[in-house]
Image (cartoon, rainbow, N blue to C red):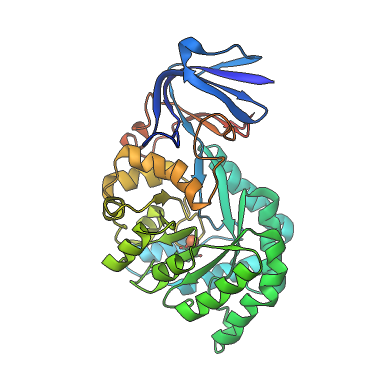
């Protein structure tokens, strides 16, 4: 079964052999067996079993949201309101969600995860990374990664999110647990290991202990780095060849240099700075130095309860020095790099058929019309989900 998407005004291919967005105007594409079979000028489109008229709209690869925390219960709207009247964001708020999550049933967690992944798909997000980190016991973390693996594309073990209340006076013992029994229970369900390396969470030595154990268990590292302070986490991410250093809000020149001369992607999460009233990360500085930048939502009930990649793009363009083209690339191909995936984030033959038809004539409208729903149709792996 093949489907022709015809009458595309602007096709963003992100062709890895080209530069930037690899735009083709007056284009068409063909989906077959869940993959992109053909892209090119509309006039040369081959015949297919079914056709969809894009009506001159822009077509993009589905968004790749490479950083989200979606296995949780409850919400923290009051904490957000308190921040907006001056209270700072602190890692400790995570414990509120830990309490609610521990008390929830498997089915409640699953339903909430399904709701959020559906919300993302309706906005054009077709690849979702999902972390654990609100369980913080062996059983609860195992449950979180197991449920995440049922629905998310990429699963990350984040047992080292914060030290839970019951280990308050023995962070070393909790770190050991996260690097041994908890890791062993979670590794079969996950591809990635992550640590929140920050004041109030885990220091560099503790983060290294968990990440190196994770690597030994067959997981690949990624890191919450330099979100609240100019700490050691970006350097640690590069040292361990992490796929991604996420947040990157407070960076020294040495951090920028380290990222630029590595394979580690700098994943920026502007919804967090919006929702915590922090300064935005400086994407321009990273790009000018030659670093690879991804954009992601960090969707979670604490630091950013938004699942909107379009919102991240708009903020990145307005306040972080990115051009619309750079921001759209970072939200698609950049996210794929941050997950070391070559099958998503682009629309060239052989890619997974993750197709986002915008209700707009160009990708620029994502930043130009902030807050306006602009998703017209979405295919994930060749199946129309909207
Ligand atoms: O990426 N920074 C650590 N973890 C999340 C926040 C989680 C929460 O506040 O519940 C983040 O911002
Ligand atoms: Fe996060």
Residue 254 lies left or right of residue 351; in this view the side is left
Question: Residue drawn at (45%, 33%), measured in percent from left and top?
Answer: 15
Q: Is residue 105 left or right of residue 204?
A: right
Callout count: 0
Q: Considering the image in quadrants, where does the C terminus appear?
A: top right
Q: Give the residue drawn at x 37%, y 36%.
A: 19
Q: Is any part of residue 166 visible from this angle?
A: no
Q: Is residue 370 visible?
A: yes
Residue 297 lies left or right of residue 316; in this view the side is right
The percent coordinates of residue 350 (x first, y second) are 58, 32
Quarter of image, res 252: bottom left
Residue located at (44% from left, 60% from top):
246
Indicate the position of residue 46 as horizontal and vertical percent values: 57, 13
Give residue 241's position: percent from left, percent from top. Answer: 48, 63
Hey, which residue is sitting farthest bottom in the picture?
169
Q: Is residue 240 above or below residue 19?
A: below
Q: Can you say whether 362 is above or below 265 in the image?
A: above
Viewer-side residue, 87 vs 58: 58
Where is residue 184 drawn, in percent x and y? 70, 71
In which quadrant of the rendered image does the N terminus lie?
A: top right
């Amino acid at each position: 079964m093949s489907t022709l998407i015809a009458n595309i005004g602007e096709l963003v291919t992100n062709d890895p052999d080209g530069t930037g967005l690899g735009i083709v105007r007056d284009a068409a594409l063909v989906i077959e067996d869940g993959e992109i079979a053909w892209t090119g000028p509309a006039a040369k489109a081959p015949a297919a079993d079914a056709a969809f008229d894009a009506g001159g709209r822009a077509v993009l690869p589905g968004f790749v949201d490479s950083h989200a925390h979606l296995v949780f219960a409850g919400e923290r709207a009051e904490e957000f309101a308190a921040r907006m009247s001056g209270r700072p964001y602190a890692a400790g708020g995570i414990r509120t969600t830990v309490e609610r999550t521990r008390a929830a049933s498997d089915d409640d967690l699953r339903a909430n995860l399904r709701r959020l992944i559906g919300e993302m798909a309706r906005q054009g997000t077709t690849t979702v990374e999902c972390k654990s980190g609100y369980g913080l016991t062996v059983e609860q973390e195992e449950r979180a990664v197991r449920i995440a693996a049922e629905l998310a594309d990429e699963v990350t073990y984040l047992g080292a999110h914060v030290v839970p209340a019951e280990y308050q006076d023995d962070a070393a013992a909790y770190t050991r647990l996260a690097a041994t029994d908890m890791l062993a229970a979670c590794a079969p369900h996950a591809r990635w290991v992550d640590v929140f390396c920050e004041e109030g969470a885990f220091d560099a030595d503790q983060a290294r202990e968990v990440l190196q154990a994770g690597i030994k268990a067959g997981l690949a590292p990624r890191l919450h780095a330099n979100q609240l302070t100019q700490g050691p986490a970006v350097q640690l991410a590069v040292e361990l060849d992490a796929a991604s250093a996420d947040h990157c809000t407070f960076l020294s020149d040495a951090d920028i240099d380290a990222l630029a001369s590595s394979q580690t992607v700098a994943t920026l999460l502007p919804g967090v700075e919006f929702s915590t009233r922090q300064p935005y990360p400086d994407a321009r500085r990273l790009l000018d130095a030659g670093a690879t930048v991804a954009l992601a939502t960090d969707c979670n009930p604490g630091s950013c309860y938004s699942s909107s990649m379009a919102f991240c793009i708009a903020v990145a363009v307005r306040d972080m020095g990115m051009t619309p083209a750079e921001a759209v690339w970072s939200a698609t191909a950049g996210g794929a790099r941050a997950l070391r995936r070559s099958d998503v984030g682009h629309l060239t033959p052989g890619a997974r058929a993750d197709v986002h038809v915008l209700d707009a004539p160009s990708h620029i409208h994502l930043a130009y019309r902030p807050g306006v729903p602009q998703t017209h149709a979405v295919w994930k792996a060749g199946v129309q989900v909207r």
